[in-house]
Image: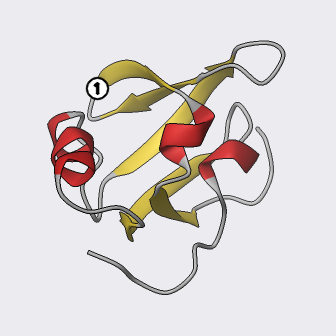
Amino acid sequence: MKTASPDIRFSELQPGMRAQVQGYTTTGDGVDRFADLGLVPGAEFEVVRQAPFGGPLEICIAGSSLCLRRCDGDCVLLKALNAQKK
């Protein structure tokens, strides 16, 4: 599923920011993997923390925590729900 350009890239998110999944820039197995992780269109999540030196982000989605590499997360189209860190 593809939609318009993202409001914000996953790699630009900071701890405390919230976002909503809008779609994907990939197809096939990539979409299935994101769906398995709960990153489906309409799902909202919050960034909990980030690893140093551009490492993965820990997000909380549907009551579960998961870490996702920034390069993988950039395949998910997002809408920012808050513009600034808490």
> Dot 1: within a 10 Å radius of its alpha carbon, few (fewer than 14), some, or many (20 or more) residues?
few
Q: Tell me which corner region of the image, top left, top right, bottom left or bottom right, holds residue 70.
A: top right
Give the residue displayed 74% in from the left and 37% down from the top.
14
Q: Is residue 34 above or below residue 61?
A: below
Give the residue displayed 42% in from the left and 66% down from the top.
25
Q: Is residue 62 above or below residue 52?
A: below
From the viewer's side, name the closer residue of 57 and 83.
Answer: 57
Three-letter amino acid code of the residue under disc 1:
Gly
Label 1: state its secondary structure: loop
**Could you say where residue 28 lies in the image, as x and y percent from the top left?**
17, 57
Give the residue displayed 80% in from the left and 52% down from the top.
84
- Colour convention: secondary structure
From the viewer's side, name the closer residue of 8 and 80.
Answer: 8
Instruction: Point out the image quarter for the N terminus.
Output: bottom left
Which residue is the site of mark 1? 63
Q: Is residue 85 above or below residue 55?
A: below
